[in-house]
Image (spheres, helix red, strand yellow):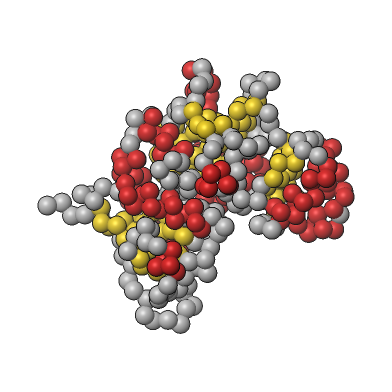
Amino acid sequence: MKKLLTVALLFGGRSAEHDISIISARAIHHNLDRKKYRVLSIYINKQGRWKLVSSPVAPAAALRSGHSFSFLPWSSRVDQPAVRADVYFPVLHGPFGEDGTIQGLLEMADVPYVGAPVLASALGMDKAVFKNLLSRLGLPVVPYLVVYEEDWKDNLRQVEKQALAEIGLPLFVKPANLGSSVGISKVKNRKQLTPAIRLAFRYDRKILIEKAISGREIECSVLGNERPRASLPGEVIPYREFYDYADKYLEGKTRFRIPADLPPGLVRRFQELAIASFRAIDACGLARVDFFLEAKTNKIYINEINTIPGFTEISMYPRLWEVSGLSFSRLLDRLITLALERHRKKKRCLERS
């Protein structure tokens, strides 16, 4: 009988996307083939402490209660349980999970893990750095400004004047290092700008002010390591002004076209740009790339890349692969295989050096 691979799901975490991480982990836990895998569930609470739990489906009270432990090397506790697995599967959205921090810990432990490595995770998480990089590579991004909190406090009027002059209305204000539409505002008049900036700075010390593109929101999933491939694109049709947190995870009134109704030439272009974005940050495993298709010009703009995209049953990443011929369970198999392959290649390189 073939030995089962032990997969450690890491979920929860310290970011504002804690609850979304739990929902994603539940879907992955449900779809992992028990004929192939033994699943170990590790919950990370909002204080960053770890806990072995029965599954992500456990009630919130069960996740929070009981003994938890620290993985920090300076922790004085000696009663930490051994957490050993064949491959680790971080399902941690946002800071302290998608930004290279947990990836750095797993690299230090020298274990295989699903998804992008440290640098790619950090580049993908920081929307400002990501856009700076893509701009240097000549890839199309929405006009934007990067604003630091101290600069805004020192010269509020000048920053806002610059935003209105260079970006113009309508515009979006968003934290540089967060996902799931947390802290994002659409600004349609001058009076809305200061409250929107103030809200974004609640979540980050650095924010983006971007031109609001009138058109369609398109998303494309990417899968692979050195030879990534892109799924068919899908379209998000927001219920409100934009696809916000409430509609993503609470109300579910936004509609989707999966796959998007696009001519073959545009489909190929979205796939090419998705792979170019993936390679720009040297990603591995998976990512979802989000785009705007401007109504008047049909011009494509790359919005952002998500190296640990939402993974719920209704999330775009697995649904786009479903219509591209890869079921949720087979997608998870492929991600685990890619993680093991990348770790083996890295070990061989270290042995030759």
In the image, residue 320 lies at what x, y percent? Answer: 43, 33
Residue at point 32% right, 64% down?
Answer: 54
Residue 300 relative to residue 157: left or right: left
* Residue 257: image location, x then y, percent: 49, 28
Left or right, residue 162 beside residue 206: right
Q: Quadrant of the C terminus?
A: bottom left
Q: Residue at x 52, y 20 (%)?
A: 262
- Of 274 and 19, which appears nearest the observer? 19
Quadrant of residue 284 in the image? top left
Q: Closer to the camera, 38 or 65?
A: 65
Asked if residue 120 can be seen in this view, the reply is no
Question: Is 47 rendered above or below residue 278?
Answer: below
Q: Residue at x 53, y 24 (%)?
A: 269
x then y, percent, for residue 258? 46, 29
Q: Residue furthest left?
A: 1
Q: How many marks?
A: 0
Q: Quadrant of residue 134?
A: top right
Q: Compare residues 58 and 168 and report the one nearer the observer.
A: 58
Q: Is residue 314 left or right of residue 240?
A: left
Q: Is residue 72 visible?
A: yes
Q: Position of residue 116 (x, y in %)?
A: 46, 48
Establish if 70 lies above or below 251: below
Q: Residue at x 49, y 56 (%)?
A: 19
Quick check: 187 left or right of 291?
Answer: right
